[in-house]
Image: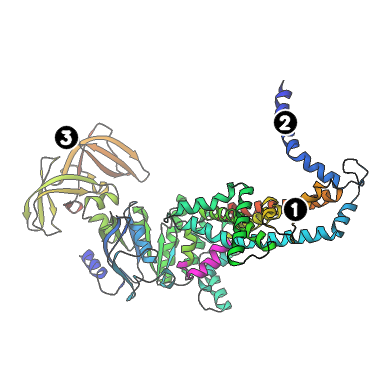
Amino acid sequence: MTAVRVGFPRILLGLGYAFLYAPIALLVIYSFNESRLVTVWGGFSTRWYGEVLANERIVDAAWLSLSIAAMSATVAVLLGTPAGFALARFGRFSGRTVFAGLLAAPLVMPEVITGLSLLLLFVGLEESIGWPNERGMATIVIAHVSFTMPYVAIVVQARLAGFDRNLEEAALDLGARPLAVLRSITLPLTAPAIVAGWLLSFTLSFDDLVIASFVTGPGATTLPMLIFSSVRLGLSPQINALATMMLVAVSLCLVVAAWMMGRRQTVSS
Amino acid sequence: MSRAAAETAVSEPGSFIRIEDIAKSFSGVPAVAGVSLEIRRGELFCLLGASGSGKTTLLRMLAGFERPDRGAISIDGADVTAMPPYLRPVNLMFQSYALFPHMSVEGNIAFGLRQENLSRSEIARRVDEMLALVQMTAFARRRPHELSGGQRQRTALARALAKLPKVLLLDEPLAALDRKLREETRQELVAIQARLGITFIVVTHDAEEAMGMASRIAILKGGKLAQIGSPSALYDRPRSRYVADFLGPVNLFECEILGHEPGSVVLRLADLDTELRVPDELGTARTGRAWLAIRPERMTQSIGVAPVNRMRGVLRAAVFRGESHSCRIELPNGKSVLFTAPTVVPIPRQGESVELSWPPSAGVVLFE
């Protein structure tokens, strides 16, 4: 009787995890499949990894995706950090509710709508001011900044909400001018949140297929776009290997981001 | 006579910090409503008050974190009213200590020194000096979260003292410590203050703590100065019922002033149908309603022939406090009177009649 009581929730939990992670596990396992046929196990091999790295199209797309992710994450941090400061520090300034709402909107906006509206914007801009004359990397970066910046703002705001203002006052009291306080107290103590925000933005940008598809041009194919288009032609073990590598990279980013955000407990206590 | 001499010394010129009629409101609610104070060089001065009395706001204005709505503050002859905190010759030890969590004990102490153009060796020398002063040398490399409460307190003190400010402000320096450590730390603070000769301004809500370390105390009430003076002057000669009660247990008797005789006031207590005489220190010719304040420990059980100042009641409660008993008697009209009897004196049993008397100088007449 007790065995059933203990066992049943465990089984449910196992089923839940299986539902979530079995497909991913399967993908990882098949990436080590020797056989060219995706669904038939032909022995362990890492040859597809080698082929992925030798495939120029894949390497180019990966490089483009990484560059876009790094640039958009950096711009998102530069814009999102001040936004987080404004939300956490400037009290109830007029227009705060609107500001907070507009900032959070991209988080809940369907990607199709974000992508479409950005495409319309770029087309309109091209017609009226002649820029961007070609859609590609630059437009994808701009699009990615627009939906990753709120994540940075929210992470930074959360960090500042738990920030002891006395620390800044103590620094001022000890003779540090406001800029020195920002440099030596506020930024070092907010850094984990800023880094976490950068990593989150990087991951979101690196993952994005929908928005990038809308705003890209003929010359720029990101990694998710490449994977999606090649899968439409049929499953390939090469793509499994590529997807596994992406999976590892993204998980690593998220683990580091979570660890950075978790550091606030030890820092502020 | 000696008291008079002491008061003269206190009001002598050479006031180091001059606070002139400063006021500060927060969204229309006054926190400090016109306070003037003069604090001497090298003094250990206490700002004492209940929460909401404006003591912390006053401290923050001295540190430069709040700008007074009106009035002026000068330190050592220089007007600092509009000076930002980072330029003031003042350092503050925060109640929460506000130690920088990403710096070691050393780094915290060095922070203020690094803002000046001092050489590395000079900074290191001063940091070592401060570490030795607060006995934290062994913990120099620790981070704040690795320290005990007392160690954090000492680090915060060292950090605030490192720049050798003209004035050190301490916001409830002992509040976060447990009871035993508090007494130890209080003595340490007094010793360090005496050694460095820096003017200390301590904010506290604890009257006992204030009396135990201050050379002078300013009692704040509702954003205004209630009274200022040495601990013993405030304790023995309060000028209002609020001050009398804030500094310790006191018996307050409503009374009517009947008249004045040379050197003494004649009054009648509402609770007691007798005339009393107390020394007329205020020298005022006021008459009418007033209060007579007598500290419980100034009341003694009279044996044999009682002097003039006496009252008789029934012992209702006695609490043993080690060196004394805290007793409560009830007067015939039901009013309770407290008195403290040294343990060496036997006290009557509960329900027995007690006669209390007090020296004329123990009674203080209060008008407010």
Q: Chain of mark 1?
A: A
Tag on residue B165?
none
Secondary structure of the residue carrying numbered label 3: loop
Q: Range of the magenta residues?
A: A172-188
Question: What's the residue type where badge 3 is placed?
Answer: Asn
Q: Nearer the viewer, mark 2 or mark 3?
A: 2
Q: Mark 2 touching mark 3, by CB under 8 A?
A: no
Depth check, front residue: B306 or A153: A153
The location of residue B186, given as percent across then percent down, is 42, 58
Per the image, the residue denoted by label 2 is A10
How far, Cα to Cα, is label 2 from label 3?
A: 76 Å
Per the image, the residue denoted by label 3 is B333
Q: For residue A50, which quarter of the picture?
A: bottom right
Q: Could you tell me if residue A262 is visible in this image?
A: no
Q: Residues within 10 Å of mark 1 (few under 14, many from 20)?
A: some
The location of residue A27, given as percent across then percent down, is 81, 44
